[in-house]
Image (cartoon, rainbow, N blue to C red):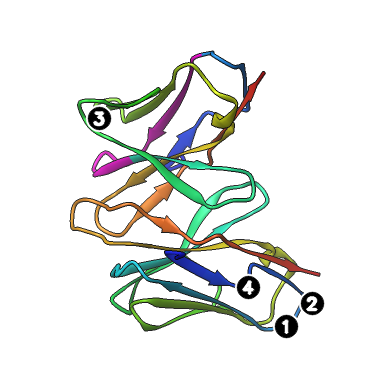
């Protein structure tokens, strides 16, 4: 059983298209995240949701819109894709306790290539 | 100054060697500290948490110096399977977690 699963794993699309990446976790965690890892391998947080509410939005362009229908799901929709959006997008989850942090569990990543 | 800085590497070491990675963080109010490991084309996974008194897990030893805002990871008796990128991770309280850019390690036979 995969704890954090995201689909699709690979996505090649043209500039200007709209695409979505889906994520689900079966760990019962309250908090979910989207991270972006670019070609320089730097892992940067994009969004964080706690119990379906957005709590972190790290200056991500409006073209990126997360949606959390319930606390086990956090999907990422990207409008008008640009070449610079090419990266690996990791979904993750954790059970955050105030003043501490449980382990962050990552999905396998979605490799997005914009051509 | 970056929030979390690490030696970029790569570190190339022979099997059996001891290797140490360093990490500094900028926010003195940071709460929790971790080392994650990321294999090529894989997701990051927790290697170990870092406690104030220092802690050990087999061949791996982590140290924290809050006064200097410095974290380290020591790997003894390196194995080929230790080849990976090691990410220093700092939680600033609650939901904000910062990942360092990672240090690449290559262990050679």
Output the chain of dot 4: A
**A78, B43: nearer the viewer:** B43
Instruction: Please tell me if label 4 and label 1 are on a single chain.
Output: yes
Residue position marked by numbered label 4 in the rendering: A8
Relative to A67, is A111 on the left or the right? right
Q: Secondary structure at mark 3?
A: loop
- Are the residues flagged by discs 4 and 3 in contact, CB closer than 8 Å? no
Residue position marked by numbered label 1 in the rendering: A17
- Up the image or down, A101 lies above or below B51; here it is below
Residue position marked by numbered label 2 in the rendering: A14
Relative to A47, is B66 on the left or the right? left
The CA span between labels 4 and 3 is 41 Å
For the point 60% across and 26% down, which residue is it?
Answer: B80
Instruction: Please tell me if label 4 and label 3 are on a single chain.
Output: no
Output the chain of dot 2: A
First reached walking from the N terminus: tag 2 or tag 4:
4
- Are the residues flagged by discs 3 and 2 in contact, CB closer than 8 Å? no
Q: Quadrant of the C terminus of chain A?
A: bottom right
- Are the residues flagged by discs 2 and 1 in contact, CB closer than 8 Å? yes
Q: Secondary structure at mark 1?
A: loop
- Up the image or down, A76 lies above or below B6; here it is below
For the point 25% across and 52% down, which residue is it?
Answer: B93
Residue B25 percent location from the top left of the image: 37, 37
- Are the residues flagged by discs 2 and 4 in contact, CB closer than 8 Å? no
Any part of residue B21 in sight: yes
Disc sitting over residue B66 in the figure: 3
Output the chain of dot 3: B
**A39, A110: nearer the viewer:** A110
The CA span between labels 2 and 1 is 6 Å
The CA span between labels 3 and 1 is 47 Å
Q: Which residues are magenta?
A: B18-33
């Amino acid at each position: 059983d995969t704890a954090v699963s995201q689909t699709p794993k690979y996505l090649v699309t043209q500039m200007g298209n709209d695409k979505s990446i889906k994520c689900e976790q079966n760990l019962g965690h309250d908090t979910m995240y989207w991270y972006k890892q670019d070609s320089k391998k730097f892992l940067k947080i994009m969004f964080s949701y706690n119990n379906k509410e957005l709590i972190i939005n790290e200056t991500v362009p409006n073209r990126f819109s997360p949606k959390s229908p319930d606390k086990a799901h956090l999907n990422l929709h990207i409008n008008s894709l640009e070449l610079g959006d090419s990266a690996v997008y990791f979904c993750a989850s954790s059970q955050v306790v105030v003043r501490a942090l449980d382990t962050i569990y990552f999905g396998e990543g979605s490799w997005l290539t914009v051509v | 100054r970056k929030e979390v800085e690490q030696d970029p590497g790569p570190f190339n070491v022979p099997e059996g060697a001891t290797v140490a990675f360093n990490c500094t963080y900028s926010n003195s109010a940071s709460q929790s500290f971790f080392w994650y490991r990321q294999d090529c084309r894989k997701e990051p996974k927790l290697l170990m948490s870092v406690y104030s008194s220092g802690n050990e897990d087999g061949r791996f030893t982590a140290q924290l110096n809050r006064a200097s805002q410095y974290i380290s990871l020591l790997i003894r008796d390196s194995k080929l399977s230790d080849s990976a990128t090691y990410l220093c991770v700092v939680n600033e309280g609650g939901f904000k977690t910062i990942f360092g850019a990672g240090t690449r390690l290559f262990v050679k036979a």
